[in-house]
Structure formats: structure tokens, C-alpha cells
Image (cartoon, grey):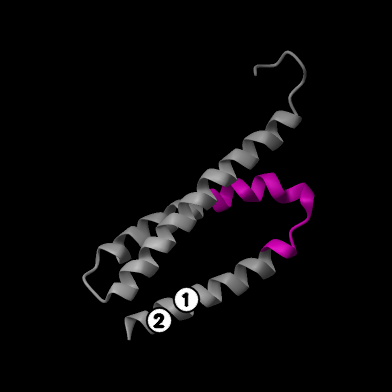
Amino acid sequence: MEAIYLTFILILSIFLGFELISKIPSTLHTALMSGSNAISGITIVGSILITGVKGTPFITILGLLAVIFATINVVGGYWVTDRMLKMYKKKGEGK
């Protein structure tokens, strides 16, 4: 039964994420990316907790995938945010 709920949450988050991201103007991207990195950090903690719960192998695999994808999202988000912020720096201002 837990696997059904986890699968439903995964599918719902995929559709919701796609709808939200497609409607964000490019001028707000950097600021919202920083906020989404914080949310993805919470997702990592939740997915680690789910992965550690004794259950079916399906739940463990789904939790592990959630940890992997949330980690990729956080690292990629910080990388993109850093690159975008470097575009606004003047020459000679730091690296």
C-alpha cells in the first residue's frame, strides 16, 4: 500500500514540477532556483528517511532513486545559480 502512495506522489510531483517550471519567466530563474535548492534539500532528507524504512524492495529502490535525483537537482541547481550570478559580476570582481 505504501508503494502505491509513493508512486502516486512521484507521478504527481513530475507533472506539478513540469507545469511550474514551464511557467517561470527567465528573469526570475536564478532567485527561484535558490529557493528550490532549499526545498530539494528537504526532499533529500525525506527520501533518506523513506529509504531507511524496512519495507519492500520496491520502496527501497524508489527511495534510493529519490535520493539520487534530489541530490542531482541540488548540485545542478547550485551550479547553474553560480554560473548565472557570475554573469552579473563586473570584470575584476572576484573569480
Q: Is residue 9 magenta?
A: no
Q: Are marks 2 and 1 in contact (CB under 8 Å)?
A: yes
Secondary structure, magenta segment, majority class: helix
Q: Mark 1 belongs to which amino acid? A: Ile
Residue at the spot x=54%, y=76% of the render?
Answer: 12
Could you tell me residue 77's position as x and y percent?
58, 46
State the extent of the magenta-drawn residues as a range: 21-37
Q: Which residue is mark 2?
A: 5
The C terminus, quarter of image: top right
Asked whether 14 or 88 is in front, the reply is 14
Between the residue at mark 2 and the residue at mark 1, the CA separation in whole angstroms equals 6 Å
Q: Is residue 51 left or right of residue 67?
A: left
Q: Is residue 45 above or below residue 18?
A: above
Instruction: In the displayed orientation, state which residue is furthest to the bottom.
Output: 1
Q: Is residue 25 left or right of residue 85?
A: right
Question: How many residues crowd around disc 2 within 10 Å: few (fewer than 14), some, or many (20 or more)?
Answer: few
Element class at badge 1: helix
Residue at the spot x=70%, y=16% of the render?
Answer: 93
Q: Is residue 8 above or below residue 16?
A: below
Instruction: In the displayed orientation, state which residue is furthest to the top.
Output: 92
Could you tell me residue 71's position as x and y percent?
46, 50
Residue at the spot x=49%, y=54% of the render?
Answer: 40
Q: Is residue 60 left or right of residue 6?
A: left
Q: Is residue 81 above or below residue 40?
A: above
Q: Is residue 90 above or below residue 57?
A: above
Q: Mark 2 belongs to which amino acid? A: Tyr
Q: Which residue is mark 1?
A: 9
